[in-house]
Image (cartoon, grey):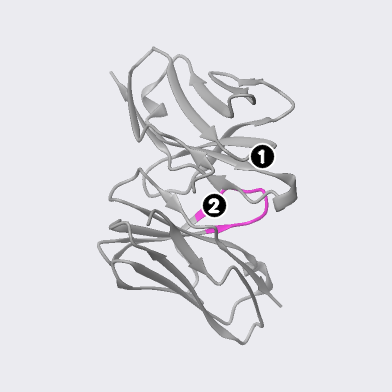
Amino acid sequence: DTEVTQTPKHLVMGMTNKKSLKCEQHMGHRAMYWYKQKAKKPPELMFVYSYEKLSINESVPSRFSPECPNSSLLNLHLHALQPEDSALYLCASSPQGDYGYTFGSGTRLTVV
Amino acid sequence: DQQVKQNSPSLSVQEGRISILNCDYTNSMFDYFLWYKKYPAEGPTFLISISSIKDKNEDGRFTVFLNKSAKHLSLHIVPSQPGDSAVYFCAASAVDSNYQLIWGAGTKLIIKP
């Protein structure tokens, strides 16, 4: 298995809803990442997990809450989002260190 | 199945020489290609792009070449400088996928003094 799988592919949620994005990889990668990407812009780094521990939080608002239950899974819990949070949320993984990335296909999130 | 492939995980080049980073793709519907540069603990930043109607685009020290028949593109950096040490991503998009970017795995470029 050489993929990063993200679910759901599309999500529409209201501003009072609570939802979660899921990311899974079975390549034994020890680093996992959440990125936010707006249309035609490069991805913005949100969080980095290294060996299941949060190593980087790029000043992301607390309405986004990451979780790494084990070495294969990465979740992003969403609560009280704003319409401007609508974007493509990309998960990626790498063996360790800053190379050999595999990106998931993303979850397209719309906040209404 | 990886639609965008960067087969070299890393590349080491002497300062002042030319760096050549390669990228191959499989989807003939891709019509726009981009190169991004990424420093550690940061998100990728846009470097240079090329439309499928061109075969070359140049911006300062950076030139991207596109060979559509071979489904291959390359990024040339000349002369290479220490600040060019970073991870370089190739990405591609197609108009019929609403320009969603498909990313390669990245190549780590190391410029040696």
The answer to whether A79 appears left or right of B110 in the picture is: right
Q: Residue at x 58, y 19 (%)?
A: B60
Q: Residue at x 54, y 81 (%)?
A: A19
> Foreground: B4 or B64?
B4
Q: Amino acid at mark 1?
A: Phe
The answer to whether B67 appears left or right of B75 in the picture is: right
SS at badge 1: loop
> Foreground: B112 or A70?
A70
Q: Residue at x 55, y 61 (%)?
A: A106
User: Which image quadrant is residue A18 in?
Assistant: bottom right
Q: Is residue B109 above or below residue A16?
A: above
- Give residue A109's position: percent from left, percent from top: 62, 69
Few, some or many C-alpha atoms within 10 Å of disc 1 (few <14, some 14-19, many ≥20)?
many
Few, some or many C-alpha atoms within 10 Å of disc 2 (few <14, some 14-19, many ≥20)?
many
The residue identified by callout 1 is B30
Residue A43, numbered circle: 2
- Give residue A6's position: percent from left, percent from top: 49, 66
Looking at the rendered image, the disc whose residue lies closer to the viewer, 2 or 1, is 1
Prevalent SS, magenta region: loop
Q: Amino acid at mark 2?
A: Pro
Q: Residue at x 39, y 69 (%)?
A: A74
The answer to whether B94 appears left or right of A23 in the picture is: right
Q: Quadrant of the C terminus of chain B?
A: top left
- Give residue B103's position: percent from left, percent from top: 52, 45
Residue extending farthest left: A51
Q: Which residues are magenta?
A: A36-44
